[in-house]
Image (spheres, rainbow, N blue to C red):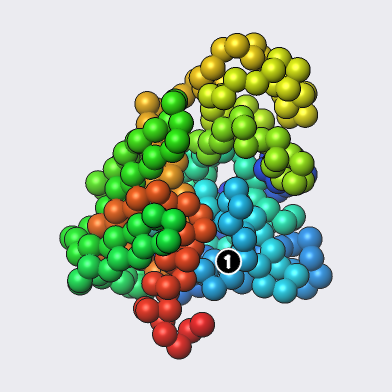
Amino acid sequence: MKQHTLARPFSVEGKGLHTGIYLHATFAPAAENYGIRLCRSDLPDQPTHHAYADYVSATERGTVLEHGSWRISTVEHALSALYAMGIDNCLITVDGAELPILDGSAMPYIKAINEVGIIEQQAEAEVYKVTEPIEYISEHGNRLQLLPSDSYQVEVHVSYPSQLLQSQRAELANLSDYPKEIAAARTFCFVREIEPLLRAGLIKGGDLKNALVIYETPMSQEGLDYLTDKLGQPRLDATKLGYLSPIHFHNEPARHKLLDIIGDLSLIGCRLQARIIAEKPGHTFNTSCARQLRNKIYPKQL
């Protein structure tokens, strides 16, 4: 398998999920063995570092990479798209502390990559082939299995104490199906989660256009009006439970969790040849597994 990079640069722009600040990010071709790196163009000396699990510093509502003054949030959707499209070398430059949330999925990146094209390079891609089962289990019931396989495959199982979102499953048998089956799945949250996030100073850029919002616990009309007003959204009928925007797939939350785990596991720093089975995945657990696996593959590169 050869390494690949972009044929031409592309840019995306939009507000950040957490800060609400309007951001610009450019994805540029890079030389062989460069890897995926992120640059903060707004900081002195424009610090640039690899997208490695070593740098994960936080995982609330997204994956955050940090090293000194260099800190970039919500990297998982872009990294997921790059990995799925076979991009091994790319420089991502952003003028703020997070990548724009766009529509909450990876589809804008997929469209941009398809528009600029992909170039095959001469060097061989580094691939870690799983030859015997590897398993990680957390005290909270999260579980990740990596099994020997002839290709990269992912299966995700999620479950929530929810009437609307209980158990869901999603599977990606071939990375070539990612643009059609996974990329459009949006990040999601429950209405009951929004108020504490707002009070914590998070999701200042969140709205019903960049997330799948699930309204399952009835609240007062006054309370729902407060939340929609804070999000700058039209007011809704508090008696009507359900998804507050049309869903793209019947199991969209599970598909988005699959999208996330591809992005988080890309922080290992190389390609995987494995069948990945994840139960109750989340950014905290995903990135912990990525760090452990990276340390297993590169024991001297901590």
Check the image and report above or below for 93 versus 260.
below
Outermost residue, right side = 44
**For the residue labelled by badge 1, is the local secondary structure a helix, a strand or a loop?**
strand
Residue 209 seen in this snapshot: no
In the image, what residue occupies the spot 28% across and 68% down?
134
In the image, what residue occupies the spot 66% across and 59% down?
72
Q: Amino acid at mark 1?
A: Val
Residue 9 percent across, percent down from the top left: 57, 53
Q: Nearer the viewer, residue 200 or 35?
A: 200
Q: What is the number of callouts on the image?
A: 1
Outermost residue, bottom side = 300
Q: Nearer the viewer, residue 96 or 66?
A: 66
Residue 216 seen in this snapshot: yes
Q: Which residue is mark 1?
A: 56
In the image, what residue occupies the spot 62% across and 66% down?
57
In the image, what residue occupies the spot 79% across and 65% down?
43
Crowd around label 1: few <14 · some 14–19 · many ≥20 (10 Å)? many
Check the image and report above or below for 149 versus 127.
above
Residue 206 percent across, percent down from the top left: 67, 36
Q: Nearer the viewer, residue 263 or 141?
A: 141
Residue 121 percent across, percent down from the top left: 39, 66
Q: Nearer the viewer, residue 269 or 117?
A: 269
Residue 54 percent across, percent down from the top left: 54, 73
Check the image and report above or below for 161 versus 81.
above
**Quadrant position of residue 94:** bottom right
Position of the N terminus by quadrant = bottom left
